[in-house]
């Protein structure tokens, strides 16, 4: 199964240039997901690629940061603000990536609007 994630263009680009090896989430999928389809949110608003999920880490906020910080692609301040008032963090480990040469619209997948978190496809 695949999932579509909305990711800010700044972070999506870091995934595809190899500098961001983890995508952080406050909530995680309930089904077994193998690949992430990446929707770069505003101002890009296109599906720009996909990646294989190597692993999904789950632990307290500080433990996840210590394990992922070298390849997080974000600052500690941004990380702390994102997980403010949360007890645990999820880190999706990025595997093989595929950056589409021709990005496309959500409508091409039959999707009318960008998900706040994720949707199964």
Image: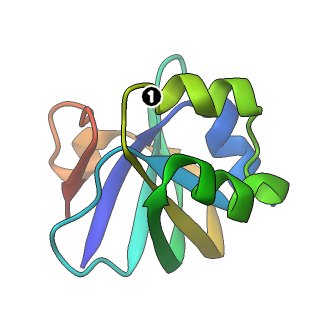
The image quadrant of residue 21 is bottom right
Q: Residue tagged by mark 1?
A: 45
The reply, left or right, for residue 71 in relation to residue 25 is right
Q: Nearer the viewer, residue 43 or 56?
A: 56
Give how far across and how far down residue 81 sits, in percent: 55, 22
Where, quadrant-wise, is the N terminus in this rendering?
bottom left
Residue 84 vertical placement versus 102 (above, below):
above
Q: Is residue 16 visible?
A: no
Task: Give the class, few, some or many, for how many residues have Cα within 10 Å of label 1's Cα (few <14, many ≥20).
Answer: some
The image quadrant of residue 18 is bottom right
Give how far across and how far down residue 58 sits, in percent: 43, 66
Which structural element holds mark 1?
Answer: loop
Residue 93 vertical placement versus 49 (above, below):
below
Say how many tags the image has: 1
Give how far across and how far down residue 111 sits, in percent: 17, 43
Q: Nearer the viewer, residue 63 or 51?
A: 63
Residue 18 vertical placement versus 103 (above, below):
below
Q: Nearer the viewer, residue 56 or 116?
A: 56
Residue at image point 28% right, 40% down? 117
Q: Is residue 8 visible?
A: yes
The reply, left or right, for residue 85 in relation to residue 71 is left
Q: Nearer the viewer, residue 34 or 99?
A: 34
Give how far across and how far down residue 28 sits, in percent: 29, 58
Judged from this view, the residue extending furthest toward the top is 43
The reply, left or right, for residue 70 in relation to residue 29 is right
């Amino acid at each position: 199964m695949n999932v579509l994630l909305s990711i800010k263009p700044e972070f999506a680009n870091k995934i595809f240039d190899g500098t961001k090896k983890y995508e952080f989430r406050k909530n995680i999928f309930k089904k077994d997901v193998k690949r992430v389809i990446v929707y770069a949110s505003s101002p890009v608003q296109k599906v720009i690629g996909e990646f294989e999920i190597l692993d999904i880490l789950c632990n307290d906020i500080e433990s996840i940061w210590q394990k992922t910080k070298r390849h997080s692609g974000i600052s500690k301040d941004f990380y702390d603000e994102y997980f403010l008032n949360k007890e645990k963090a999820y880190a999706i480990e990025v595997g093989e990536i595929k950056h589409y040469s021709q990005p496309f619209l959500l409508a091409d997948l039959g999707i009318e609007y960008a998900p706040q978190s994720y949707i199964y496809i």
